[in-house]
């Protein structure tokens, strides 16, 4: 389905979308700035194999808006942005990322970029050759971003358990972690530390075995993880894993993980709600890295993982309580609450006449 770009921008309240094309490196892509009403837009660079330009555009809009939702719900003086770069052959990637750095530099601090799927330390090094408006995982210390994300997810799971049962009681809990990469392995380690039973799954069997040996966790074959009876199912791999076929298979009380856009569509959050499964909205509990990056760049503060976890746990607890009072799926409530706060932020902005 084609996107009517100008309609989509107006409906979603976007500020700018830039279409990028660099003749020298061969890069093409989109930069979306969703909101800068309370501070600069933050969001990483996603390099991914898209089937069409439309799909890439849809993704950059969805991801940048989700970044604003995270910022407003977690009380950060920042908004959402994102860059999406279709992965294809024949691109000089070093030149491409330097070009991205030039684009970011020209924005003059209105947009800060950073890591995302397909963009790691090496690529960010090339971006940093051209701009200072970039969060590099190594500028915060190796693993600090994933560690912050995992701590937020851990606190989100704790808040969800307390919401349902009034206590965490970790030694009696079983958590299935889907994806044992940077975030998933960090989360598994944190859970093992409190004596929870952890069952992991990863498509990369070598990685799964390594993590299992190091942490002493059990493994389940990838794709069977949906069927395991557990307290918490924690998606820490890719988005879009909960849909018509997987929701009915789940045998858990809570879904709470680090992956972005876990629900294929909002109706899948409704389906979880109807099944009595509590869904901790991903854009709340996976905000640890964003909080860390925002506090580091905008306030010059290295926020501790404990403080990050606390902030996420408290925010999620409030969202779950209101959603329960209103008998609504938490993801629906969180989305509406974020949109309402964005509206208030924008109303508080001076008008163009007042600025003159
Ligand atoms: P990663 O690339 O280090 O790990 C992902 C792991 O998931 C890999 O080991 C991969 O083999 C595995 N995997 C992929 N599809 C799978 C499937 N269907 N079943 C089982 N395993 C599968 O990525 P990272 O950094 O750990 O991120 C995980 C998720 O969290 C991603 O969706 C990412 O967008 C999201 N996220 C990560 C943040 C961070 O700080 N790294 C921040 C916010 C969100």
Image: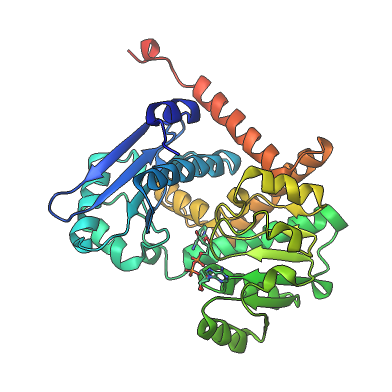
Residue visible at 25% across and 43% down in the picture: 20
Q: Against 165, is 5 above or below?
A: above
Residue at the extreme top: 353
Q: Is residue 278 left or right of residue 79?
A: right
Q: Position of residue 5 (x, y in %)?
A: 38, 31
The image quarter containing residue 232 is bottom right
Residue visible at 21% across and 48% down in the picture: 102
Residue visible at 68% across and 44% down in the picture: 267
- Residue 213, visible in the rendered structure: yes
- Residue 306, visible in the rendered structure: no
Residue at the extreme left: 24
Q: Position of residue 340 (x, y in %)?
A: 61, 28
The image quarter containing residue 256 is bottom right
Q: Is residue 192 left or right of residue 77?
A: right
Q: Is residue 18 left or right of residue 82?
A: left
Q: Against 161, is 317 above or below?
A: above
State the residue in front, 2 or 182: 2
Q: Position of residue 138 (x, y in %)?
A: 37, 67
State the residue in front, 20 or 324: 20
Q: Against 333, is 257 above or below?
A: below
Residue at the extreme right: 165
Quadrant that contains the C terminus? top left
The image quarter containing residue 170 is bottom right
State the residue in front, 266 or 192: 266
Residue visible at 75% across and 59% down in the picture: 248
Q: Position of residue 104 (x, y in %)?
A: 27, 45
Residue at the extreme front: 1
Quadrant that contains the N terminus? top left
């Amino acid at each position: 389905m084609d996107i009517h770009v100008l309609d989509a921008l107006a409906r979603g309240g976007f500020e700018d979308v830039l279409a990028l094309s660099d003749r020298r490196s061969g890069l093409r892509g989109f930069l979306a700035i969703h909101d800068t009403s309370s501070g600069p837009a933050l969001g990483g660079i996603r390099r991914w194999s898209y089937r069409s330009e439309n799909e890439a555009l849809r993704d950059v809009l969805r991801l940048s808006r989700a970044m604003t939702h995270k910022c407003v719900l977690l009380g950060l003086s920042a908004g959402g942005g994102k860059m999406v770069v279709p992965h294809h052959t024949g691109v000089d990637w070093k030149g491409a990322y330097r070009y991205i750095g030039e684009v970011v530099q020209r924005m003059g601090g209105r947009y800060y970029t950073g890591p995302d799927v397909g963009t790691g330390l090496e690529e960010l090094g090339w971006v940093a050759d051209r701009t200072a408006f970039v969060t590099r995982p190594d500028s915060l210390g190796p693993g600090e971003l994933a560690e912050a994300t995992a701590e937020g997810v851990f606190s989100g799971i704790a808040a969800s358990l307390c919401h349902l049962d009034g206590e965490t009681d970790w030694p009696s809990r079983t958590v299935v972690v889907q994806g044992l990469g940077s975030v998933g392995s960090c989360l598994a380690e944190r859970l093992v530390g409190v004596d929870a039973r952890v069952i992991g799954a990863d498509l990369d069997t070598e990685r799964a075995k390594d993590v299992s040996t190091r942490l002493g966790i059990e493994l389940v074959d990838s794709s069977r993880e949906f069927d395991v009876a557990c307290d918490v199912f924690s998606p820490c791999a890719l988005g879009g894993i909960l849909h018509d076929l997987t929701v009915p298979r789940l045998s858990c009380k809570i879904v709470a993980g680090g992956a972005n856009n876990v629900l294929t569509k909002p109706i899948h959050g409704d389906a979880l709600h109807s099944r009595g499964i509590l869904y901790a909205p991903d854009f709340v509990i996976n905000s640890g890295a964003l909080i860390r990056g925002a506090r580091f760049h905008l306030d010059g503060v290295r926020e501790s993982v404990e403080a990050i976890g606390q902030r996420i746990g408290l925010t999620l607890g409030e969202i779950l309580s209101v959603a329960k009072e209103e008998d609504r799926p938490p993801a629906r409530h969180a989305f509406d609450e974020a949109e309402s706060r964005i509206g208030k932020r924008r109303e508080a902005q001076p008008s163009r006449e007042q600025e003159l």
